[in-house]
Amino acid sequence: MPESWEDKFESLRASRVLTHNADYLEFLVSKVWRIDRQPLKIAEFGCGYGRFASMLLPLVSSGSSYTGFDSAGALVGKGKGIFAESPYATAFVRGDVNDAPLRGSSFDVTIAHLVLMHVPDPQRVLREMLRVTRPGGLLITCDANRNGHNALLHIEETNEQESVHLELFQAVNRGIRHESGVDYNIGMKTAVLMHRLGLENVQARTSDSVVLLFPPVDTPEKEQIFRAMCSEGLGYQPTDEAEIERWRRAVIARGVSRETADKEIQRELERDFQHKGRSYHTVSASAFTFSFGTVPR
């Protein structure tokens, strides 16, 4: 069953603090992509409420226009409201990333930010991005590498770097991909897909964002980071035995042994980030990969 994003506004807004550093995005726009030289027509696939647009639009040339579309009508509506009074020329419409409601060869830049990792056929979405981008235009994607994220996460008090069962996360992500086609490690693979589609000058960069949460959590900014970390998975802390058993069965169904599943579940329950996380020294890297390439002329 496809993921539903209709009710995800609050979690998406909270997680923004974990994605990219503003100065790094400015570096990409001006030094790498060079999309701040002249006004451009920009389209975003799976735009949500415009989270990435709010970071990007202040960095591009004045006079640029932005069209974002998403299948979640509630998020599109939020985007329209948020940008209604903005100084930018924006349009938010409802549409499917597999069948973009956009004319062919009509945009200078097309973007899919944290989208391909949620679709069963990322190549189809990339082909749609290619279709609507003019010759000489730029395709940009950004997606996760969850195996890498889990490997890089460190919580000092629980010795995360040495105690986490990395093979479990690899098995779970592999099982999800085999079952549904959804690949939570698509970030490091997208450049290959772009090359195979015939894009030119294909390149990639990794987000530089590493978020620190150290005690005391005594400011609104620290509290925001803590809640974002919880919403991204660290806060899952079931207490009902039936829910824990469902968790165990779900992990085992992905090809993990019962012994390994039990060890990791017990470890995460003891870690109890939801209740103890404010006292932990946590270092979390986003591990997102930007891939980009040019449409042949």
Image (tube, grey):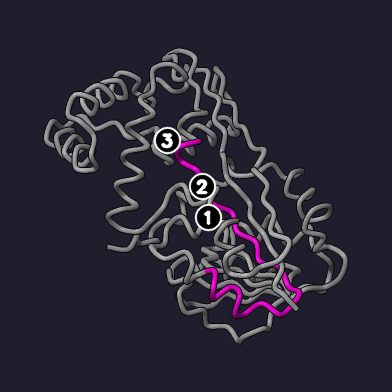
Residue 131, placed above or below residue 213: below
The circle drawn on residue 114 is: 1
What amino acid type is highlighted by mark number 3? Cys
Residue 10, placed above or below residue 38: above
Q: CA distance from mark 3 to mark 1?
A: 19 Å
Q: Of the residues tagged 2 and 3, which is closer to the observer?
A: 2
Indicate whether residue 175 is drawn in magenta. Answer: no
**Circle 1 — which element?**
loop
The circle drawn on residue 144 is: 2
- Viewer-side residue, 238 vs 78: 238
Q: CA distance from mark 2 to mark 3?
A: 17 Å
Residue 274, placed above or below residue 15: above
* Residue 181, horizontal then vertical, whole percent: 35, 58
In the figure, is residue 251 to the left or right of 200? left
Tell me the quadrant of the picture where the N terminus can be found: bottom left
In the figure, is residue 54 to the left or right of 285? right
Q: Name the residue carrying label 3.
A: 230
Q: Of the residues tagged 3 and 1, which is closer to the observer?
A: 1
In the figure, is residue 170 to the left or right of 16? left
- Viewer-side residue, 35 vs 276: 35
